Amino acid sequence: MKRYIEQLIEDLEQVAKNPPNPAYFEVPPNLDDKPEAAELAQVPYKPISEWTGIAQEVFPLITDLEGDQWGRVNDAIFKVFDSLGLTLVDAPEDMPQEWLYEVLTTNWDHPVQFLPLSGMDLELCTGDPMTCPYGDYCDCGEEFDEFELPDKFAPCINPIAQLIDAGFVCYLNPDTLDIEEVPKGLADDPDGYKMLTGFGLENEELKHESWEKCYVFEPLEAFESFEIMEAFAENMEDEIQQEELLYVLHNKKPFANFKDVVHKLGQSDNWFYFKMKCLEDRVRYTIYKELYENAEPPGDSELPS
């Protein structure tokens, strides 16, 4: 078995040094400056085994390894992940190497995208303690509200979500809860926006510039919108409808075709509510970060005596 493990590690490291050729995709004119969004939309999902040419069956059972072999194979697997732009983002830090080996090798046929421009976050947790591959090492069974906010922010969440969905950059005064919105084109390129519309910043009296504190909410990038559409499709209970939506998402003109298919399937209302829930979560997360992660340390006078 020792010689077999050495050969397996060598094969994995060889794959890591020679990643597959990137999948072909076309960049539409409206995404010339964001080719990673086109890549995300068009590159197909394939099992890791197919991208690498290494079958899942080549990995020995967890009980066949010993000593440092689990860790060494894991290291080689992560080299392969690096070459594919994959980042395993949800592995518990305290997981033993032998159990991590079991998780990695039993999920070797997990479908992923090879995205050289942007990379892909790989999540193996199912969210269900009964099926999660990380077992007792995962906290997916714990119930908690990660983005619990003061009640005063509740009336702001949905209006901001709707505004960023409409393409506005939103500014929130956390003290007065005033909201100001500016078209993203105007915020990003005032001169270009004025040339196109005849409307410039001099026509606006921007209140947020005088606020002592200001939280900023940006509209979604194309790849973020795509991820929400993909999540909606993957959560469809009807497998036929799910396959139809996933098909259009991974072919030409995914955004326009997705909208048409959602309408045809009679899922427009469900899609709207799903999208708004995702946007509201994004707004909550932004406020949460501003409140807690960017909190200033207390001054000397505020410290307990």
Image (cartoon, grey):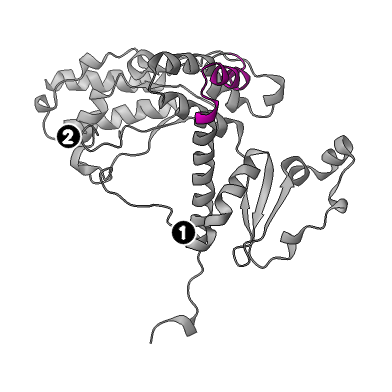
Along the viewing direction, whichever of 52 and 233 lies nearer the viewer: 233
- Residue 212, given in percent of the width and then of the height, sits at 66, 68
Q: Quadrant of residue 41?
A: top right
Amino acid of disc 2 = Glu
Residue 229 drawn in magenta: no
Residue at 23% x, 46% y: name it. 94
Q: Quadrant of residue 28?
A: top right
Residue holding disc 2: 98
Label 2 vs label 1, nearer the camera: 1
- Residue 124, given in percent of the width and then of the height, sits at 32, 32
Using a 10 Å C-alpha cutoff, classify the residue at mark 1 as few (fewer than 14 neighbours), some (14 to 19) or many (20 or more).
some
Q: Is residue 99 above or below residue 177?
A: above
The local secondary structure at tag 1 comes to loop
- Residue 153, given in percent of the width and then of the height, sits at 53, 59
Residue holding disc 1: 149
- Residue 24 in view of the camera: yes
Image: magenta residue range = 252-270
In the rendered image, the quadrant that contains the N terminus is top left
Give left or right: position of 76 versus 62: right
